[in-house]
Amino acid sequence: MDIAVVVNLNARRGSERFAAWARKALPGSRVVATRTADDVKRFVDDAARGTVPGVVLSGGGDGTAIGLLDAMRARGLAFPALGLVPLGTGNAWAIGTNAPGPRAALEAMQRVVERGDTSLPTNDFSLVEVEGRVTPFADAGWGAEILHDYKVQRAQAPAFARRVVEGELGYFTSLFGRTIPRNVLARTRPQVRVTNLGQKAFTFDPHGNVVEVPDGGPGTVLYEGPYGVAGAGTTMELGFGFKALHFARTMPGYMHTRVYAATAAQATLRIPQLWRGVHPIPHSHDFLLTHCRMEFDREVPVEVGGDVIGLRREVEYRIAPQMVSVVDWRRLKARA
C-alpha cells in the first residue's frame, strides 16, 4: 500500500515528534514535513509528476487537510484516501472520523503494512465549497468570532500563561472572556437572509426525521432574521467534540445548514445541549441543502475549516462535485 505522511510542523501538538515516529513506523512511506502552503503544493506537484499515493495521512489540524485537498484539486488530481491525525487545536474533522491519538494512528497503519492489507475501511465525505475552497464545515458569526478571539488571545498571552490560553481550556477562556461578553453587550444583532439555490430543501421534525420543506425549491427564502451562527457542513463536529452540525451525515450529497438565532445570553444557558447536538432546541433553524446563499446586513467574519478568511456581506455554501474517502479509524482498529 502506497502511503504518504504529510505533517504540519506548525501544528500545536508534537508535530516534529510525530514526523520522527512516522519515519520509524512506516519506513517505506514518504514523510513530508511542511511549514507553509508552498511546502504542501510542492508535495502535490511531486505527486502529480509521479504517482499519487493511495493513502495520505494528514498530521495537523483541519486546515492542514483542507490545504492538501485544495492543492490536489487545483492540479486536477483524484483525492487519495485521507487519514486524519489530530495534531491541531480543535481537530473537528479528525474527531468526526474517530481518529485516535497520533502514535496510535501510526501503530494502526504500521499493522496495516505488516499484514499486507490492500485496502482500508473508509467513509465517503461530501465537501462544502466556499469561494473556491473545499471544507467539511464553514461558518459566519460566533464560530468565526470565537476562532478570531482565540487566536488573538494566544498571540497576546505571555509565555507562562500559554497552557491556559491554548487547547480546549483556551477555547472556553476566549468564549466566556471575549466572544460572549461582546455579543451580550452589543446594541444590535446582525441579520441574515438564507436563500436556497440548489435542489429541494429538507428540514427535520421534532423527532429528527427528515421532512421536505414545502415549496422549498430554488429561490426560496428559507430564513430571514437575526442570527448568532449561520453555517454549513458535512461533518457534525466543529472542534473539541462540539456537535454543532449534528445532522451533517443524514443524507449523502447534502450539507447540514444551520442558523442559530438565539441571543448570546440565551445560547450561554444552553451550552451543554448545544454541545451534545440536542434536537429540537429553541431558535435553531436546520436544513439539508445542496447550495445556498447567505446575505448579511453588515460585514461579518467567515471561517472555512477553522481559518478565518475575512469579512463578508454575502457568502455561498454549496456541495462540491468531488467527494473524499476518509479512513474510519474505529473500523480499522477492529481489524487488529
Image (tube, grey):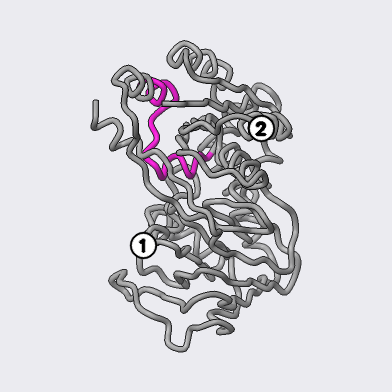
Residue 43 lies left or right of residue 335; in this view the side is right
Q: Residue tagged by mark 1?
A: 250
Residue 243 lies left or right of residue 135; in this view the side is left
Up-down: is 147 above or below 138? Answer: above
Q: Position of residue 194 (x, y in %)?
A: 59, 76
Query: Neighbour class for label 1 at 10 Å: few (<14), some, many (≥20)?
Result: some
Q: Residue tagged by mark 2?
A: 40
**Residue at coordinates 51% horizontally, 31% vertically from top-left?**
53
Foreground residue among 117 and 207: 117
Three-letter residue code for mark 1:
Thr
Foreground residue among 171 and 31: 31
Q: Position of residue 233 (x, y in %)?
A: 50, 58
Foreground residue among 235 and 320: 320
Q: Position of residue 236 (x, y in %)?
A: 43, 54
**Residue at coordinates 68% horizontally, 39% vertically from top-left?**
153
Residue 165 lies left or right of residue 273; in this view the side is right
Three-letter residue code for mark 2:
Val
